[in-house]
Every structure is written in structure tokens, then in C-alpha cells.
Amino acid sequence: MQALRDISLVAPAGEITCLLGSSGCGKSTLLSLAAGLLPVQQGAILLGGEVLADETRAPPPEKRPVGLVFQEGALFPHMTLARNIAFGLPKARHGEIAGWLDQVGLAGLGSRYPHELSGGQQQRAALARAMAPGPAVLLMDEPFASVDIVLRRSLRRDCRMLLKERGATTILVTHDPGEALDIGDRIAVMEAGRIVQFGSPEELHEAPAAASVGAMFSGAQVVPAERRGEALATPFGDWPAACVIGPVPDAARLELLVHARALDLVPDAAGLPVRDVHGLGDGRVRVLLGEKGGRDLAIEAGEAPSPGERFRVVPQTGSVRAFAAG
């Protein structure tokens, strides 16, 4: 089974590049190839223009100028924090340990063992240990996934500040679009072993290359459609082509990127029934429309209809992005 297909990616020096995608898309495989945990079977990995690994060259992780940070931190449990950080340093540099602990917010905790720390503190220590030797590239695999969500936000902000201050070239794997937006300078969105789009957070948000990319960053929903003259046939009725931003792609099958707030409900006895109504806490409600066992569509409305009421859905003019279905 081929895990990666036609991958070509440049992680700019001094920037944080995020590999983003769902489980099984190939992002951790790509990181493992760079780290030396997997051999390169085709192609090559270059660092500063020099071949680091290819089909004939496979230096082990300890022979590569890379630092690794994993989801669980992977600290040595029998060593204190200070000894963990010292592990990758020559004895002459052990005087830097206190400075590293201070940089990651763990000043005065060098004598503690990993089990005496919180999950967030352990990840900070793992980051210090990986960065202390001064690797050319820092590779991070879901480094904040095991930390609770409130701490995760502050931890990744602190991490970004430290990485940018040190000018570290970083590749970070995540399945969380919010995390990629929060920490990444550039984001490579991966699906089924290939890169669908690579760009800045602004580029991915404002000009998605596929409906799936747009849905990932904007919270919009993807609706399948077929062209029928000037109408777009969807599971929720025919929509006018005028709802699409710009020209409709020249394809029989389409994917429409639709925001819940850009849909209007029109009472219609022949329409679809309301399946659920949920308050959003800001004077608006989210309405779930659709037949039981079929596809649902979410609409944000100012008034709450009753479950079972039937409506026709009308998208606002120029509010929908259309893509040729893959």
C-alpha cells in the first residue's frame, strides 16, 4: 500500500510548517521519513540543498541534525528534568540547562522527575530537550494532543513564541485546524497520502483549493451538487447558479462550500423537515434540516422554528464556493 503520493514540500528556514490532516492521511509517515524512523523508498529528503536521505542513504535519527518531540514527550522517567535536557548535550554545555528550563517556564524544577510534572510541563521539558542541542530542524508529532484544551491553547502560543525567538525551522504534525492556524506560518493540508494545498493560513482560509480545505478552516459544510442548466441540483433542492461566487466550474458533479449563516429558510409544505434546533447563546439558533436517514444541512437563524416544520432552503446570492468534485 502506497502511503504517500507525489509529495513535494519545502519547509522554509526559520518558519513553522504544519502538516495537517485526518488520521491515516500520511502526515506522520512524512515526518517519520524526515526523522529517519522510516527509510525513503523513492525520492529524496534534502536539508539546506544537501541530500539527507534517499533510496541509498538512510542515516539513523541520532545521525541526523534534527530534534524530535512526540505526543507523550518521551522523557526518560528515571532522570530528573535537568538530566533529561543534559542527555543530548556535551558536558561542556551543561551550564546551559538552567537557562533552557527558564525559557520554557520550568525555572527551579530541574530536580523533579517527569512523573512529578503536569502534562503541559512535561511537553515543555521535551521541547527544551529537543531544542537544546541546536538541531537544524525540529520535528514535532502531535505535541499538544495529550494536554487538556485550555492548557493546549496557551502552551502552543508559548511554543510558537519560543520557536520564533530561536529561529527554529520546525515541521509540526497536527489533526487540529485550529492548532495549525494558531502556530503555523505555513500549512500543508494532506488527504490520502498527498498534499492538497500548501500555503499561509490566510491563503488557505481565503482561497481554498478544494471544498474539503475550505470546510476545514471556515467551519462551512460541503454539499454535493449536479449542474442542470442554470440550476444546481442538491439533496436540499435546486439552487440557482447565482448563489455561487464567480463562475461555476465546468464539471457535471460539484462540491459546494456553504456557510450555515448564508442560508435562508422559506416555509414550504413540500420542503424538508426541521430535525433539531439548538441555541448558540448569541440570540441565534442552529437549525438542522433533512429527512431521517438522509443528509442533514445546518442553518443559522434568528428565530427558532419547531421540530417537524418544513422549509425550503435558499442560499444567499454570491455566498457559495463551488469546486469540481474529485
Image: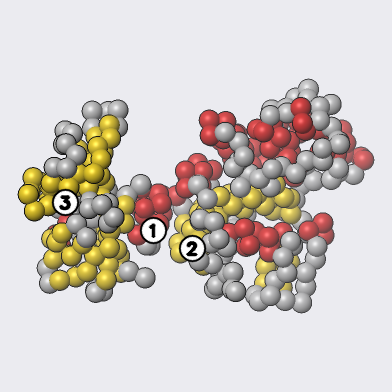
Check if mark 1's residue and mark 2's residue have beta carbons within 8 Å: yes
Res 11 quadrant in image: bottom right
Coordinates of residue 184 in the picture (x, y in percent): 53, 47
Coordinates of residue 60 in the picture (x, y in percent): 80, 62
Residue lying at 75% horizontally and 25% vertically, measured from the top left: 107
Residue 90 in view:
yes
Which label was assigned to residue 261? none
From this view, report whether residue 280 is shown above or below residue 318. above
Quarter of the figure with the C terminus = bottom left
Residue 97 in view:
no
In the image, farthest residue toward the top: 108
User: What kind of element bears circle 1?
Assistant: helix
Identify the mark nearer the N-term, 2 or 3: 2
Residue lying at 72% horizontally and 65% vertically, measured from the top left: 38
Task: Find disc 3 in the rendering and name its residue.
Answer: 272
User: What kind of element bears circle 3?
Assistant: strand
Task: Find disc 2 in the rendering and name its residue.
Answer: 191
Task: Find disc 1 in the rendering and name its residue.
Answer: 212
